[in-house]
Amino acid sequence: MKKNVLKALKWLLLGVVCAVLTVIFFQLEKEDRRRRYSLTVGCGMLTVLCLAAAFWSLTGKMDGRPGALIVEDVFGMKSGGSVVVGRVQGALAAGQRVVVTAKDGSKTETKIYAIEINGRKAKTAVDYPAALYLKEVEPSGIHKGDRVSSKEETGA
């Protein structure tokens, strides 16, 4: 999460610089009536893009890294399936196909149906402790120390 905040601050700083340039170019072009407002519009558009990038980096949308979670605890659901708890390294998203790798090397492919962080539903988990709801795997099939990882990371 700290990396995302630093990334967002960099984009925000760049956005502020572009905004200041927009104001400067606007004043310069206002004085010289022959010029068109191309520099002002260009810097204004860059400002908007930088602010959007800052927002997306905070939500984890720009973080395309594959993710993994080492299972610290497993719970069964009454409706079926399992909830695994651990710290996500990289990025995992709800709806993503993942591979559960047991300590003995056996692999099970499944899907993340939901993610919960600090008691609230989330679309993504990026470098933060989370609970993943895996509907297709029973709790007896997952143990502490198993690894839940995105298919990109495992090469599957």
Image: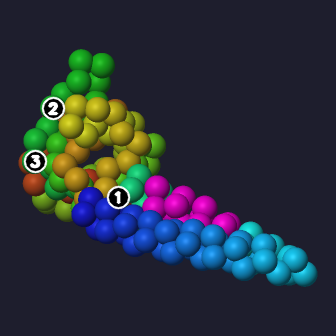
Q: Calculate the distance from the C-alpha at mark 3 to the C-alpha at mark 1.
A: 17 Å
Q: Which mark is residue 72?
A: 3
- Left or right: residue 40 versus residue 143 is right
Query: Mark 2 is on which residue type?
Result: Phe
| Disc 3 packing (10 Å; few <14; some 14–19; many ≥20) | some
Q: Secondary structure at mark 2?
A: strand
Instruction: State yes or no: residue 48 in magenta.
Output: yes
Query: Mark 1 is on which residue type?
Result: Ala
Q: Which residues are magenta?
A: 42-55
Q: Secondary structure at mark 3?
A: loop
- Left or right: residue 106 versus residue 93 is left
Q: Residue at x 19, y 49 (%)?
A: 129
- x then y, percent, for residue 94: 41, 43
Q: Which mark is residue 75?
A: 2
- x then y, percent, for residue 14: 48, 74
Q: Residue at x 39, y 64 (%)?
A: 8
Viewer-nearest residue: 83 or 58: 58
**Cβ atoms at labels 3 and 1 below 8 Å apart:** no
Indicate which disc, 3 or 1, sits on the residue closer to the N terminus.
3
Q: Calculate the distance from the C-alpha at mark 3 to the C-alpha at mark 2.
A: 11 Å
- Quickly name the residue at label 1: 91
Instruction: State yes or no: residue 138 in magenta.
Output: no
